[in-house]
Image (spheres, grey):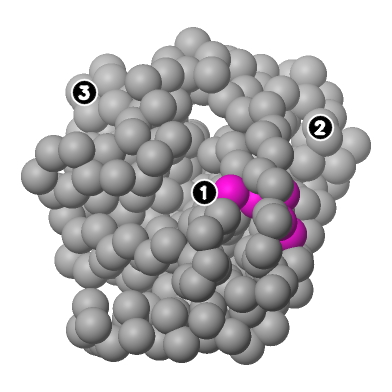
Amino acid sequence: MPSLSDVVRGVMALGLSMVALFAGTEVRGEAGAKAGHLVICGGGGLPDPVRARFVELAGGPRARIVVVPTASEDADAKGRELEEFLEPWKKREVASVTLLHTRSRAEADKAEFAARLDESDGVWFSGGDQSRVTEAYLGTAFESGLRRLLARGGVIGGTSAGAAIMSRVMITGGAEKATVGVGFGFLPDVVVDQHALRRSRLNRLVGVLTEHPEVAAGVAIDEGTALIVDLGAKRWKVDGASYVVVLRHVKEAPPPLRIDVFHAGEEGDLGTWRVQAR
């Protein structure tokens, strides 16, 4: 795993070469969720404390959890092969754990399909290919159900692909240069990247910020680590084994980017991305 100093030096070196590109950037907002929580995990193994926190936010023993495996190619399996998506949550002894999946936009737009979200307290998106999720659900009754869930104080979480879908500008692939699509935008003014340090993805996140100056911040979440967001209070907290790196436009140059590296236990305000408690 890279050290903090390696992370900062690498991003600073790249950022200093982009002063002209970032000069005069105007940050514009977008409408996001007004309440509820997000649990955004960077991939790899999901730490027990993060899983426990998701269950707690969903209601603890009374939680009704829906698992959406659509990002995975294995989501189309039958019978017991689907149990691997559900078993980790069933072990938490919550009220119910159910699977919800389709690749048909027509099905996702049916009221009876989306109504299953109205009977849930938390929705978890598994890893895989984030484009599979948005191709099936973006702009459908299913998406409306997710927003109703947040509005009534529920929790939406996901890992890897399930993290990428949280932002409106959604990274869909690419190594040094990202390809992008449109995500759900539950976390406004932000673009999310995952497996960030393990797969050395900070450079591509800088590139996305360069090409999308309307995005206020890039949030790079490493494996085994989660950013937990309270949308109502506009607060964030980091949990897990590694780091969350936040890159933000600044008006003063050089440098064109402010770089903050956060680890487990650190928390703060979404507007400033500054640590307020440890």
Q: Residue at x 76, y 42 (%)?
A: 137
Residue 224 lies, in percent from the top left, at 28, 66
Badge 2 amino acid = Thr
Pointer 3 residue = 61
Whichever of callouts 1 and 3 sits on the residue coming sooner in the sequence is 3
For residue 125, which numbered disc appears in the image? 1
Q: Residue at x 27, y 38 (%)?
A: 268
Badge 3 amino acid = Pro
Q: Using the rendered view, name the quadrant where residue 105 is placed.
A: top right
Depth check, front residue: 9 or 43: 9
Relative to 258, residue 195 above or below: below
Pointer 2 residue = 140
For residue 164, which numbered disc appears in the image? none
Depth check, front residue: 206 or 106: 206
The answer to whether 138 appears left or right of 154 in the picture is right
Q: Residue at x 13, y 39 (%)?
A: 277
Task: Residue at the far top: name it.
Answer: 152
Whichever of callouts 1 and 2 sits on the residue coming sooner in the sequence is 1
Q: Secondary structure at mark 2?
A: loop
Disc 2 crowd rating (10 Å Cα; few below 14, some 14-19, many 20+) is some
Q: Is residue 56 a member of the stretch shown in magenta?
A: no
Residue 244 lies, in percent from the top left, at 33, 62
| Res. 199 in view | no
